[in-house]
Image (spheres, helix red, strand yellow):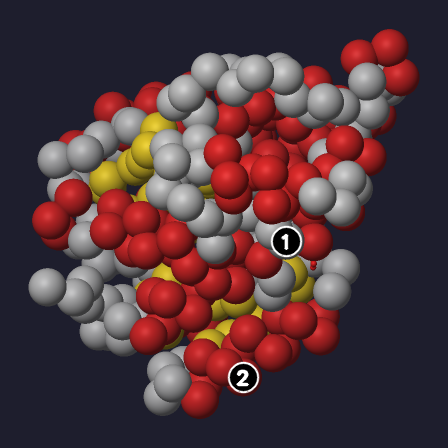
Amino acid sequence: MSIQFEGKIVLVTGSGRGIGRAIALNLAQAGADVVVNFFRNRGPAEETAADILALGRRAEVVRADVGSIEGIEFLFAEVQRLFGGLDILVCNAASGYNRPVMEQRPKGWDWTMNINARALLFCAQKAVPLMELRGGGSIVSISSPGSSRVLPEYVVVGASKAALEAVTRYLAVELAPKNIVVNAVSPGVVETGALQHFEAMQDPGLMERIAARTPAGRMLTPEDVAQVVAFLCSPEASMIRGQIITVDGGYSLPFHEP
Ligand SMILES: NC(=O)c1ccc[n+]([C@@H]2O[C@H](COP(=O)([O-])OP(=O)(O)OC[C@H]3O[C@@H](n4cnc5c(N)ncnc54)[C@H](OP(=O)(O)O)[C@@H]3O)[C@@H](O)[C@H]2O)c1
């Protein structure tokens, strides 16, 4: 049975590129109208919006920095002005100051935590009244295995994703009486622009090795992640609350020899 979101209003943060773009397009294919949010790259956001329009859905592009409280306030004021409500919020946008532990700086910590973790809490605060106008809604945050595993140069992103997962659980409990379902998806490695920022990911044979070590037999795609996000927003998933759903083709299950 395909999941239907006819008439639903969706906001996906950071949806010009990568996984966020796939989530926005997938929900639009299922009938949703979408607010496409970006921060620094307008071109890809306009392309995502054009692809959504081509599907016969409505798309609005809003530039806002979810790492700042003013940015979040502006983003949700725009959602209210443009659509007058919200059914689905996907907190996907992320950034990071990727360095080993001893090279980290307080500025990089604040930057990363604000975009990746603080944004979920304060976007949710702003989303709630808009979802209440619609009788409820769904919130999905996008985490990463670095929340509980140690990845190269990933300390602040890992800490931010651990915080994001904790906030996800609190939101799931405290927003449940408002008929708002909250969960997270934690993808394995997906080949997006994000990987360019990691020294350790520049090894030319790495993607082939990851695919070979994935029990499902191939690399994870943005669309694989998008389909699980859509499921978590569907009525069929309404009894899944505050969970962090790993989507990695089984990559994290076997012990990998170094
Ligand atoms: N790729 C992976 O292997 C992987 C694995 C596990 C988890 N994840 C998670 O999946 C999510 C998407 O990752 P991705 O690989 O698709 O990343 P990406 O290709 O680097 O895209 C990041 C997106 O976030 C947006 N963004 C960054 N800072 C923002 C801000 N302050 N305000 C609003 N938007 C902002 C970017 O918009 P602009 O282009 O406009 O700056 C861009 O659309 C992230 O939460 C990431 O941690 C990714």
Residue type at the position of mark 2? Ala
Specify the quadrant of the image occupied by residue 9. bottom left
Mark 2–mark 1 Cα distance, whole angstroms, equals: 20 Å
**Count of numbered badges drawn on the protein:** 2
Asked if the residue at label 1 sits under 8 Å from ligand 1, the reply is yes
Relative horizontal placement of residue 53, taking residue 86 as reference (left or right): right
Near-viewer residue (173 or 155): 155
In the foreground, 207 or 225: 207
In-image side of 25 versus 115 (left or right): left
Indicate the secondary structure of the residue bearing disc 1. loop
Q: Residue at x 16, y 66 (%)?
A: 2
Residue located 45% across and 37% down the image: 214
Image position, residue 112 (x, y; %): 70, 31
Q: Position of residue 234 (x, y in %)?
A: 19, 53
Residue 125's place in the image compared with 41, above or below, is: above
Q: Amino acid at mark 1?
A: Thr
Confirm whether residue 79 shows in the render: no
Residue 200 picture quarter: top right
Residue 106 versus residue 182 in the image, above or below: above
Residue 50's tag is 2
Q: How busy is the neighbourhood of tag 1: few (under 14 within 10 Å), some, or many (20 plus)? A: few
State the SS at label 2.
Answer: helix
Could you say which disc has been placed on residue 192 in the image? Answer: 1
- Mark 2 / mark 1, whichever is N-terminal: 2
**Residue found farthest to the top:** 102
In the rendered structure, the answer to whether residue 151 lies left or right of residue 175 reads right
- Residue at 82%, 24% in the rendered image: 99
Q: Residue at x 25, y 24 (%)?
A: 173
In front of the other: 206 or 47: 206
Image-quadrant location for residue 37: bottom right
